Image (cartoon, helix red, strand yellow):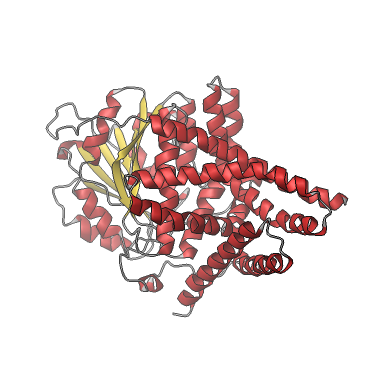
Protein backbone atom coordinates (compact mmCIF):
# COMPACT_ATOMS: atom_id res chain seq x y z
CA UNK A 1 0.00 0.00 0.00
CA UNK A 2 2.87 2.39 0.72
CA UNK A 3 4.24 2.04 -2.79
CA UNK A 4 0.74 2.62 -4.17
CA UNK A 5 0.40 5.95 -2.42
CA UNK A 6 3.95 6.85 -3.41
CA UNK A 7 3.01 6.59 -7.08
CA UNK A 8 -0.20 8.49 -6.40
CA UNK A 9 1.79 11.28 -4.75
CA UNK A 10 4.21 11.43 -7.70
CA UNK A 11 1.25 11.60 -10.06
CA UNK A 12 -0.36 14.44 -8.10
CA UNK A 13 2.84 16.50 -7.83
CA UNK A 14 3.43 16.26 -11.56
CA UNK A 15 -0.17 17.23 -12.26
CA UNK A 16 0.19 20.22 -9.94
CA UNK A 17 3.04 21.49 -12.13
CA UNK A 18 0.84 21.08 -15.20
CA UNK A 19 -1.86 23.04 -13.37
CA UNK A 20 0.63 25.82 -12.50
CA UNK A 21 1.70 26.02 -16.13
CA UNK A 22 -1.92 26.20 -17.29
CA UNK A 23 -2.73 29.00 -14.84
CA UNK A 24 0.15 31.04 -16.25
CA UNK A 25 -1.22 30.38 -19.73
CA UNK A 26 -4.70 31.45 -18.62
CA UNK A 27 -3.31 34.76 -17.35
CA UNK A 28 -1.54 35.32 -20.66
CA UNK A 29 -4.79 34.60 -22.48
CA UNK A 30 -6.48 37.41 -20.57
CA UNK A 31 -3.81 39.87 -21.66
CA UNK A 32 -3.87 38.56 -25.21
CA UNK A 33 -7.37 39.98 -25.49
CA UNK A 34 -6.11 43.29 -24.10
CA UNK A 35 -3.26 43.55 -26.60
CA UNK A 36 -3.44 46.66 -28.76
CA UNK A 37 -2.08 46.38 -32.27
CA UNK A 38 0.52 48.97 -33.15
CA UNK A 39 -0.75 51.70 -35.47
CA UNK A 40 2.62 52.60 -36.97
CA UNK A 41 2.84 53.19 -40.69
CA UNK A 42 6.07 52.15 -42.44
CA UNK A 43 8.71 54.85 -42.54
CA UNK A 44 9.70 56.35 -45.86
CA UNK A 45 12.90 55.09 -47.44
CA UNK A 46 13.76 58.77 -47.97
CA UNK A 47 13.47 59.67 -44.28
CA UNK A 48 16.74 61.46 -43.42
CA UNK A 49 16.51 60.32 -39.78
CA UNK A 50 16.71 56.61 -40.56
CA UNK A 51 19.49 54.97 -38.50
CA UNK A 52 22.18 52.77 -39.99
CA UNK A 53 21.30 49.06 -39.98
CA UNK A 54 23.34 45.88 -40.19
CA UNK A 55 21.45 42.76 -41.22
CA UNK A 56 23.16 39.58 -40.02
CA UNK A 57 22.59 36.27 -41.83
CA UNK A 58 24.21 33.44 -39.82
CA UNK A 59 24.82 30.46 -42.12
CA UNK A 60 26.34 27.01 -41.70
CA UNK A 61 26.18 24.48 -44.57
CA UNK A 62 22.89 25.70 -46.01
CA UNK A 63 23.19 24.96 -49.73
CA UNK A 64 19.46 24.33 -50.13
CA UNK A 65 18.23 27.69 -48.82
CA UNK A 66 21.11 30.19 -48.87
CA UNK A 67 20.33 31.54 -52.35
CA UNK A 68 16.74 32.22 -51.33
CA UNK A 69 17.90 33.96 -48.15
CA UNK A 70 20.38 36.26 -49.90
CA UNK A 71 17.88 37.11 -52.62
CA UNK A 72 15.28 38.11 -50.02
CA UNK A 73 17.81 40.14 -48.00
CA UNK A 74 18.87 42.02 -51.14
CA UNK A 75 15.28 43.15 -51.63
CA UNK A 76 15.00 44.83 -48.23
CA UNK A 77 13.84 48.42 -48.71
CA UNK A 78 16.29 50.79 -47.05
CA UNK A 79 18.73 53.53 -48.12
CA UNK A 80 21.76 51.81 -49.64
CA UNK A 81 24.18 54.07 -47.78
CA UNK A 82 22.63 53.11 -44.43
CA UNK A 83 22.32 49.36 -44.95
CA UNK A 84 24.96 46.66 -44.50
CA UNK A 85 24.21 42.93 -44.91
CA UNK A 86 26.63 40.55 -43.22
CA UNK A 87 26.71 36.94 -44.35
CA UNK A 88 28.21 35.19 -41.33
CA UNK A 89 29.32 31.97 -42.96
CA UNK A 90 30.77 29.09 -40.97
CA UNK A 91 30.22 26.61 -43.81
CA UNK A 92 32.56 23.77 -44.66
CA UNK A 93 30.91 22.71 -47.93
CA UNK A 94 29.87 24.27 -51.25
CA UNK A 95 27.58 26.74 -49.48
CA UNK A 96 30.39 29.31 -49.53
CA UNK A 97 30.62 29.17 -53.33
CA UNK A 98 26.84 29.52 -53.63
CA UNK A 99 26.95 32.58 -51.40
CA UNK A 100 29.59 34.29 -53.52
CA UNK A 101 27.69 33.46 -56.69
CA UNK A 102 24.48 34.91 -55.28
CA UNK A 103 26.10 38.05 -53.87
CA UNK A 104 27.55 38.85 -57.30
CA UNK A 105 24.01 39.16 -58.61
CA UNK A 106 23.43 42.23 -56.43
CA UNK A 107 26.41 44.56 -57.00
CA UNK A 108 24.52 47.59 -55.68
CA UNK A 109 23.82 45.96 -52.30
CA UNK A 110 26.38 46.34 -49.52
CA UNK A 111 27.04 42.68 -48.75
CA UNK A 112 29.90 41.77 -46.40
CA UNK A 113 31.05 38.18 -46.36
CA UNK A 114 32.60 37.00 -43.07
CA UNK A 115 33.90 33.46 -42.94
CA UNK A 116 35.18 31.80 -39.76
CA UNK A 117 37.55 28.86 -39.93
CA UNK A 118 36.83 28.06 -36.27
CA UNK A 119 33.16 27.63 -35.28
CA UNK A 120 33.80 28.54 -31.63
CA UNK A 121 30.50 29.43 -29.98
CA UNK A 122 28.50 28.21 -33.00
CA UNK A 123 25.72 30.69 -33.86
CA UNK A 124 26.38 32.88 -30.82
CA UNK A 125 30.06 33.02 -31.77
CA UNK A 126 29.23 33.99 -35.35
CA UNK A 127 26.89 36.76 -34.22
CA UNK A 128 29.49 38.02 -31.74
CA UNK A 129 32.18 38.06 -34.41
CA UNK A 130 29.91 39.92 -36.82
CA UNK A 131 29.00 42.48 -34.18
CA UNK A 132 32.63 43.54 -33.81
CA UNK A 133 32.62 44.52 -37.48
CA UNK A 134 29.04 45.80 -37.77
CA UNK A 135 28.63 49.45 -38.77
CA UNK A 136 24.92 49.65 -37.99
CA UNK A 137 23.28 51.21 -34.94
CA UNK A 138 20.63 48.50 -35.27
CA UNK A 139 21.18 44.78 -35.88
CA UNK A 140 18.54 42.68 -37.66
CA UNK A 141 18.96 38.89 -37.70
CA UNK A 142 17.52 36.26 -40.03
CA UNK A 143 18.30 32.56 -40.00
CA UNK A 144 18.94 30.70 -43.23
CA UNK A 145 15.40 29.33 -43.57
CA UNK A 146 13.74 32.76 -43.36
CA UNK A 147 12.48 35.01 -46.13
CA UNK A 148 12.36 38.56 -44.70
CA UNK A 149 9.62 40.87 -45.89
CA UNK A 150 10.98 43.76 -48.04
CA UNK A 151 9.35 46.29 -45.66
CA UNK A 152 10.71 44.65 -42.50
CA UNK A 153 13.19 47.41 -41.66
CA UNK A 154 10.90 50.31 -42.53
CA UNK A 155 8.21 48.85 -40.26
CA UNK A 156 10.45 48.17 -37.25
CA UNK A 157 13.19 50.80 -36.99
CA UNK A 158 10.76 53.53 -35.95
CA UNK A 159 10.40 51.91 -32.53
CA UNK A 160 14.03 52.69 -31.75
CA UNK A 161 13.34 56.41 -31.60
CA UNK A 162 12.45 55.53 -28.04
CA UNK A 163 15.90 55.26 -26.46
CA UNK A 164 14.73 52.55 -24.05
CA UNK A 165 13.76 50.15 -26.85
CA UNK A 166 16.29 47.34 -27.07
CA UNK A 167 14.63 44.83 -29.42
CA UNK A 168 11.63 44.42 -31.70
CA UNK A 169 10.41 40.88 -32.47
CA UNK A 170 8.07 39.98 -35.32
CA UNK A 171 5.77 36.99 -35.78
CA UNK A 172 6.95 33.88 -37.55
CA UNK A 173 4.73 32.56 -40.30
CA UNK A 174 5.18 29.31 -42.16
CA UNK A 175 6.25 28.79 -45.77
CA UNK A 176 5.40 25.09 -45.79
CA UNK A 177 2.64 24.84 -43.20
CA UNK A 178 0.54 22.54 -45.42
CA UNK A 179 3.41 20.33 -46.57
CA UNK A 180 2.52 17.48 -44.22
CA UNK A 181 0.74 16.59 -41.00
CA UNK A 182 3.93 17.23 -39.03
CA UNK A 183 4.40 20.74 -40.42
CA UNK A 184 0.76 21.56 -39.69
CA UNK A 185 1.09 20.43 -36.06
CA UNK A 186 4.26 22.50 -35.65
CA UNK A 187 2.46 25.56 -36.99
CA UNK A 188 -0.35 24.81 -34.54
CA UNK A 189 2.11 24.97 -31.64
CA UNK A 190 4.16 27.95 -32.83
CA UNK A 191 1.07 30.04 -33.51
CA UNK A 192 0.09 29.66 -29.86
CA UNK A 193 3.49 30.95 -28.79
CA UNK A 194 3.55 33.87 -31.20
CA UNK A 195 -0.03 34.88 -30.55
CA UNK A 196 -1.07 34.22 -26.96
CA UNK A 197 2.29 33.92 -25.20
CA UNK A 198 4.28 36.72 -26.84
CA UNK A 199 1.31 39.08 -27.02
CA UNK A 200 0.13 38.27 -23.48
CA UNK A 201 3.57 38.86 -21.96
CA UNK A 202 4.30 41.99 -23.94
CA UNK A 203 0.91 43.56 -23.12
CA UNK A 204 1.60 43.38 -19.38
CA UNK A 205 5.28 44.34 -19.81
CA UNK A 206 6.52 40.96 -18.67
CA UNK A 207 9.73 39.60 -20.17
CA UNK A 208 9.44 38.28 -23.72
CA UNK A 209 12.16 36.63 -25.76
CA UNK A 210 13.90 37.32 -29.01
CA UNK A 211 13.15 34.21 -31.04
CA UNK A 212 16.61 33.93 -32.57
CA UNK A 213 15.54 35.38 -35.91
CA UNK A 214 12.96 37.72 -37.39
CA UNK A 215 13.89 40.47 -34.94
CA UNK A 216 15.99 43.62 -34.74
CA UNK A 217 18.20 44.82 -31.88
CA UNK A 218 19.80 48.05 -30.80
CA UNK A 219 23.53 47.33 -30.99
CA UNK A 220 24.24 49.16 -27.75
CA UNK A 221 21.63 46.99 -25.99
CA UNK A 222 23.44 43.81 -27.04
CA UNK A 223 26.75 45.15 -25.81
CA UNK A 224 25.30 46.54 -22.57
CA UNK A 225 23.70 43.17 -21.79
CA UNK A 226 27.01 41.35 -22.16
CA UNK A 227 26.97 40.46 -25.86
CA UNK A 228 26.15 37.04 -27.32
CA UNK A 229 27.19 34.20 -25.01
CA UNK A 230 27.46 30.51 -25.87
CA UNK A 231 27.09 28.85 -22.46
CA UNK A 232 23.51 27.81 -23.31
CA UNK A 233 21.96 26.31 -26.45
CA UNK A 234 19.46 29.18 -26.69
CA UNK A 235 21.62 32.27 -26.98
CA UNK A 236 18.52 34.25 -28.00
CA UNK A 237 16.58 33.57 -24.78
CA UNK A 238 19.74 34.10 -22.73
CA UNK A 239 20.48 37.56 -24.15
CA UNK A 240 16.79 38.50 -23.92
CA UNK A 241 16.75 37.96 -20.17
CA UNK A 242 20.06 39.69 -19.59
CA UNK A 243 18.91 42.74 -21.56
CA UNK A 244 15.49 43.05 -19.93
CA UNK A 245 16.96 42.66 -16.47
CA UNK A 246 19.09 45.72 -17.28
CA UNK A 247 15.97 47.74 -18.06
CA UNK A 248 15.77 47.52 -21.85
CA UNK A 249 12.25 47.39 -23.31
CA UNK A 250 11.19 44.82 -25.88
CA UNK A 251 8.36 45.28 -28.38
CA UNK A 252 6.41 42.54 -30.10
CA UNK A 253 4.79 43.15 -33.51
CA UNK A 254 2.40 40.29 -34.39
CA UNK A 255 1.23 42.21 -37.46
CA UNK A 256 4.67 42.01 -39.09
CA UNK A 257 5.20 38.56 -40.57
CA UNK A 258 8.54 36.82 -41.00
CA UNK A 259 8.02 33.69 -43.14
CA UNK A 260 10.15 30.63 -42.41
CA UNK A 261 10.41 26.93 -43.17
CA UNK A 262 9.21 24.25 -40.75
CA UNK A 263 11.17 20.98 -40.40
CA UNK A 264 9.28 18.42 -42.51
CA UNK A 265 10.44 15.19 -40.81
CA UNK A 266 10.54 13.94 -37.23
CA UNK A 267 14.32 13.63 -36.95
CA UNK A 268 14.72 17.32 -37.82
CA UNK A 269 11.88 18.28 -35.48
CA UNK A 270 13.57 16.38 -32.66
CA UNK A 271 16.92 18.09 -33.17
CA UNK A 272 15.20 21.47 -33.02
CA UNK A 273 13.09 20.51 -30.00
CA UNK A 274 16.12 19.16 -28.15
CA UNK A 275 18.00 22.44 -28.60
CA UNK A 276 15.05 24.59 -27.63
CA UNK A 277 14.04 22.61 -24.54
CA UNK A 278 17.54 22.00 -23.25
CA UNK A 279 18.56 25.60 -23.89
CA UNK A 280 15.43 26.84 -22.13
CA UNK A 281 16.25 24.74 -19.08
CA UNK A 282 19.84 26.04 -19.12
CA UNK A 283 18.54 29.61 -19.17
CA UNK A 284 16.25 28.79 -16.27
CA UNK A 285 19.23 27.68 -14.21
CA UNK A 286 21.20 30.74 -15.31
CA UNK A 287 18.60 33.46 -14.81
CA UNK A 288 15.73 32.45 -12.55
CA UNK A 289 17.54 33.22 -9.29
CA UNK A 290 18.61 36.66 -10.57
CA UNK A 291 15.06 37.47 -11.66
CA UNK A 292 13.73 36.82 -8.17
CA UNK A 293 16.52 38.82 -6.54
CA UNK A 294 15.78 41.93 -8.55
CA UNK A 295 13.19 44.57 -7.71
CA UNK A 296 10.69 43.58 -10.35
CA UNK A 297 6.88 43.46 -10.21
CA UNK A 298 5.52 40.16 -8.91
CA UNK A 299 3.71 39.55 -12.20
CA UNK A 300 6.99 39.85 -14.11
CA UNK A 301 8.64 37.35 -11.76
CA UNK A 302 5.70 34.95 -12.01
CA UNK A 303 5.70 34.90 -15.80
CA UNK A 304 9.48 34.76 -15.97
CA UNK A 305 9.32 31.65 -13.79
CA UNK A 306 6.67 30.06 -15.99
CA UNK A 307 8.59 31.09 -19.10
CA UNK A 308 12.00 29.81 -18.00
CA UNK A 309 10.56 26.57 -16.63
CA UNK A 310 8.02 25.89 -19.37
CA UNK A 311 10.14 23.08 -20.84
CA UNK A 312 9.83 21.24 -17.50
CA UNK A 313 6.28 20.48 -18.63
CA UNK A 314 7.78 17.56 -20.58
CA UNK A 315 9.26 16.05 -17.42
CA UNK A 316 5.89 16.52 -15.74
CA UNK A 317 4.03 14.89 -18.62
CA UNK A 318 6.46 11.96 -18.72
CA UNK A 319 6.13 11.55 -14.94
CA UNK A 320 2.33 11.66 -15.10
CA UNK A 321 2.34 9.15 -17.96
CA UNK A 322 4.55 6.58 -16.24
CA UNK A 323 3.03 6.98 -12.77
CA UNK A 324 -0.47 6.67 -14.25
CA UNK A 325 0.18 2.97 -14.92
CA UNK A 326 0.46 1.85 -11.27
CA UNK A 327 -2.21 4.40 -10.28
CA UNK A 328 -4.61 2.93 -12.87
CA UNK A 329 -3.84 -0.58 -11.62
CA UNK A 330 -4.41 0.46 -8.00
CA UNK A 331 -7.80 1.93 -8.86
CA UNK A 332 -8.71 -1.25 -10.70
CA UNK A 333 -7.72 -3.38 -7.70
CA UNK A 334 -9.55 -1.09 -5.28
CA UNK A 335 -6.39 -0.19 -3.37
CA UNK A 336 -7.14 3.52 -3.77
CA UNK A 337 -10.62 4.89 -2.99
CA UNK A 338 -12.51 5.93 -6.10
CA UNK A 339 -13.23 9.28 -4.45
CA UNK A 340 -9.55 10.15 -4.94
CA UNK A 341 -9.98 9.78 -8.67
CA UNK A 342 -13.04 12.02 -8.60
CA UNK A 343 -11.11 14.65 -6.64
CA UNK A 344 -8.32 14.50 -9.22
CA UNK A 345 -10.78 15.73 -11.86
CA UNK A 346 -9.81 19.26 -10.77
CA UNK A 347 -6.67 18.77 -12.86
CA UNK A 348 -8.84 18.72 -15.96
CA UNK A 349 -9.03 22.49 -15.56
CA UNK A 350 -5.42 22.69 -16.69
CA UNK A 351 -6.11 20.82 -19.92
CA UNK A 352 -9.19 22.95 -20.60
CA UNK A 353 -7.07 26.10 -20.21
CA UNK A 354 -4.33 24.77 -22.48
CA UNK A 355 -6.94 23.80 -25.08
CA UNK A 356 -8.41 27.32 -24.84
CA UNK A 357 -5.00 28.89 -25.50
CA UNK A 358 -4.51 26.88 -28.66
CA UNK A 359 -8.10 27.46 -29.71
CA UNK A 360 -7.84 31.23 -29.42
CA UNK A 361 -4.35 31.44 -30.94
CA UNK A 362 -5.14 29.43 -34.03
CA UNK A 363 -8.72 30.58 -34.55
CA UNK A 364 -7.78 34.26 -34.19
CA UNK A 365 -5.49 33.88 -37.20
CA UNK A 366 -8.44 32.44 -39.15
CA UNK A 367 -10.84 35.15 -37.95
CA UNK A 368 -12.73 32.54 -35.88
CA UNK A 369 -14.20 30.92 -39.00
CA UNK A 370 -16.26 27.73 -38.88
CA UNK A 371 -13.68 26.11 -41.12
CA UNK A 372 -11.06 26.91 -38.50
CA UNK A 373 -13.23 25.48 -35.71
CA UNK A 374 -13.68 22.20 -37.58
CA UNK A 375 -9.95 21.97 -38.24
CA UNK A 376 -9.24 22.69 -34.57
CA UNK A 377 -11.42 19.76 -33.47
CA UNK A 378 -9.08 17.21 -35.02
CA UNK A 379 -5.83 19.15 -34.71
CA UNK A 380 -5.99 19.69 -30.95
CA UNK A 381 -6.24 16.02 -29.82
CA UNK A 382 -3.67 14.99 -32.41
CA UNK A 383 -1.32 17.80 -31.37
CA UNK A 384 -1.67 16.94 -27.67
CA UNK A 385 -1.03 13.26 -28.44
CA UNK A 386 2.14 13.97 -30.43
CA UNK A 387 3.32 16.44 -27.76
CA UNK A 388 2.94 13.72 -25.12
CA UNK A 389 4.73 11.32 -27.47
CA UNK A 390 7.68 13.73 -27.55
CA UNK A 391 7.81 13.90 -23.76
CA UNK A 392 10.52 11.23 -23.41
CA UNK A 393 12.82 12.88 -25.97
CA UNK A 394 12.29 16.39 -24.61
CA UNK A 395 12.41 15.36 -20.95
CA UNK A 396 15.91 14.02 -21.56
CA UNK A 397 16.91 17.40 -23.04
CA UNK A 398 15.40 19.31 -20.12
CA UNK A 399 17.08 17.08 -17.57
CA UNK A 400 20.45 17.61 -19.22
CA UNK A 401 19.84 21.36 -19.17
CA UNK A 402 18.87 21.41 -15.49
CA UNK A 403 21.81 19.25 -14.43
CA UNK A 404 24.42 21.13 -16.44
CA UNK A 405 25.35 18.43 -18.94
CA UNK A 406 26.87 20.12 -21.99
CA UNK A 407 26.31 19.14 -25.60
CA UNK A 408 27.23 20.72 -28.93
CA UNK A 409 24.93 23.05 -30.85
CA UNK A 410 23.18 20.83 -33.41
CA UNK A 411 21.44 22.97 -35.99
CA UNK A 412 18.20 21.92 -37.65
CA UNK A 413 18.70 20.86 -41.30
CA UNK A 414 16.87 23.03 -43.84
CA UNK A 415 15.12 21.47 -46.84
CA UNK A 416 13.45 24.16 -48.99
CA UNK A 417 10.49 21.91 -49.78
CA UNK A 418 6.99 22.93 -50.80
CA UNK A 419 5.24 19.97 -52.42
CA UNK A 420 7.82 17.21 -53.07
CA UNK A 421 7.02 14.75 -50.27
CA UNK A 422 10.09 12.58 -50.86
CA UNK A 423 12.56 15.41 -51.45
CA UNK A 424 13.85 15.38 -47.89
CA UNK A 425 15.47 11.98 -48.43
CA UNK A 426 18.15 13.51 -50.64
CA UNK A 427 19.19 16.12 -48.08
CA UNK A 428 22.89 15.57 -47.30
CA UNK A 429 22.55 17.24 -43.89
CA UNK A 430 19.83 14.85 -42.77
CA UNK A 431 20.50 12.79 -39.63
CA UNK A 432 20.84 9.02 -40.10
CA UNK A 433 21.63 7.66 -36.66
CA UNK A 434 18.63 6.35 -34.74
CA UNK A 435 18.84 7.46 -31.08
CA UNK A 436 18.09 5.00 -28.30
CA UNK A 437 15.07 7.00 -27.15
CA UNK A 438 13.31 6.20 -30.43
CA UNK A 439 13.31 2.48 -29.56
CA UNK A 440 12.01 3.30 -26.10
CA UNK A 441 9.23 5.42 -27.61
CA UNK A 442 8.14 2.36 -29.61
CA UNK A 443 8.11 0.32 -26.39
CA UNK A 444 6.00 2.97 -24.66
CA UNK A 445 3.54 2.92 -27.57
CA UNK A 446 3.07 -0.84 -27.16
CA UNK A 447 2.79 -0.59 -23.37
CA UNK A 448 0.09 2.07 -23.46
CA UNK A 449 -1.72 0.26 -26.26
CA UNK A 450 -1.80 -2.84 -24.06
CA UNK A 451 -3.17 -0.80 -21.16
CA UNK A 452 -5.90 0.57 -23.44
CA UNK A 453 -6.82 -2.99 -24.31
CA UNK A 454 -6.86 -4.04 -20.65
CA UNK A 455 -8.95 -1.01 -19.72
CA UNK A 456 -11.60 -1.99 -22.26
CA UNK A 457 -11.43 -5.66 -21.22
CA UNK A 458 -11.83 -4.85 -17.52
CA UNK A 459 -14.29 -1.96 -18.09
CA UNK A 460 -11.89 0.40 -16.29
CA UNK A 461 -12.46 3.56 -18.28
CA UNK A 462 -11.23 6.31 -15.95
CA UNK A 463 -7.91 6.79 -17.76
CA UNK A 464 -8.85 5.32 -21.12
CA UNK A 465 -8.74 8.60 -23.05
CA UNK A 466 -5.40 9.61 -21.53
CA UNK A 467 -3.77 6.25 -22.23
CA UNK A 468 -5.24 6.16 -25.74
CA UNK A 469 -3.66 9.54 -26.50
CA UNK A 470 -0.34 8.31 -25.12
CA UNK A 471 -0.47 5.17 -27.27
CA UNK A 472 -1.30 7.26 -30.33
CA UNK A 473 1.34 9.88 -29.55
CA UNK A 474 4.21 7.50 -28.88
CA UNK A 475 3.14 5.40 -31.85
CA UNK A 476 3.17 8.34 -34.26
CA UNK A 477 6.44 9.74 -32.90
CA UNK A 478 8.25 6.39 -33.03
CA UNK A 479 6.96 5.44 -36.49
CA UNK A 480 7.76 8.82 -38.05
CA UNK A 481 11.14 8.80 -36.30
CA UNK A 482 12.13 5.38 -37.65
CA UNK A 483 10.90 6.37 -41.07
CA UNK A 484 12.84 9.64 -41.11
CA UNK A 485 16.11 8.07 -39.94
CA UNK A 486 16.01 4.71 -41.70
CA UNK A 487 14.82 5.79 -45.12
CA UNK A 488 17.66 8.24 -45.27
CA UNK A 489 20.23 5.68 -44.14
CA UNK A 490 19.05 3.33 -46.86
CA UNK A 491 19.53 5.87 -49.66
Can you tell which quarter of the image residue 429 is in?
bottom left
Question: Residue at coordinates 17% horizontally, 42% vertically from top-left?
Answer: 77
Can you tell which quarter of the image residue 389 is in?
bottom right
Question: Residue at coordinates 82% horizontally, 59% vertically from top-left?
Answer: 333
Taking depth in this image into account, of 473 and 433 the one nearest to the observer is 473
Outermost residue, left direction? 46
- Tell me if I can see residue 414 in this picture: yes
Q: In what quadrant of the picture does the C terminus appear?
A: bottom left
Question: Residue at coordinates 42% horizontally, 37% vertically from top-left?
Answer: 198
Residue 308 pos. (x, y %): 55, 38
Q: Is residue 36 above or below residue 112?
A: above
Residue 453 pos. (x, y %): 67, 69
Q: Is residue 304 above or below residue 16?
A: above
Outermost residue, bottom direction? 490
- Tell me if I can see residue 115 in this picture: no
Q: Is residue 164 left or right of residue 39?
A: right
Q: Is residue 485 left or right of residue 180?
A: right
Taking depth in this image into account, of 129 and 262 the one nearest to the observer is 262
Q: Is residue 48 left or right of residue 262?
A: left
Q: Is residue 293 above or below residue 28?
A: above
Amino acid sequence: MVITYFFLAVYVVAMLFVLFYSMAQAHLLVYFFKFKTWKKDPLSVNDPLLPTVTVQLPVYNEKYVVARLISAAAKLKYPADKLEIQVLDDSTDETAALIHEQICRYPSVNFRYIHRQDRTGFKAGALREGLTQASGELIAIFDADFVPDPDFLLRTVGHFRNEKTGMVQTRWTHLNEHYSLLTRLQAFALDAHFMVEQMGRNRQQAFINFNGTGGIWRKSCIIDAGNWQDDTLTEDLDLSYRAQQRGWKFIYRPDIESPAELPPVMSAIKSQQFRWTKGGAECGVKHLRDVWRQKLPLGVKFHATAHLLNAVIFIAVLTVSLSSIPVWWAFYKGWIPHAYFQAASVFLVGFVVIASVYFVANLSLLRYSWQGVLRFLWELPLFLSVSMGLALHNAQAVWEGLTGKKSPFVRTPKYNLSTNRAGWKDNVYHAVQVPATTYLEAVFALVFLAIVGLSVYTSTYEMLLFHSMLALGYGLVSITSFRSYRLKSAT
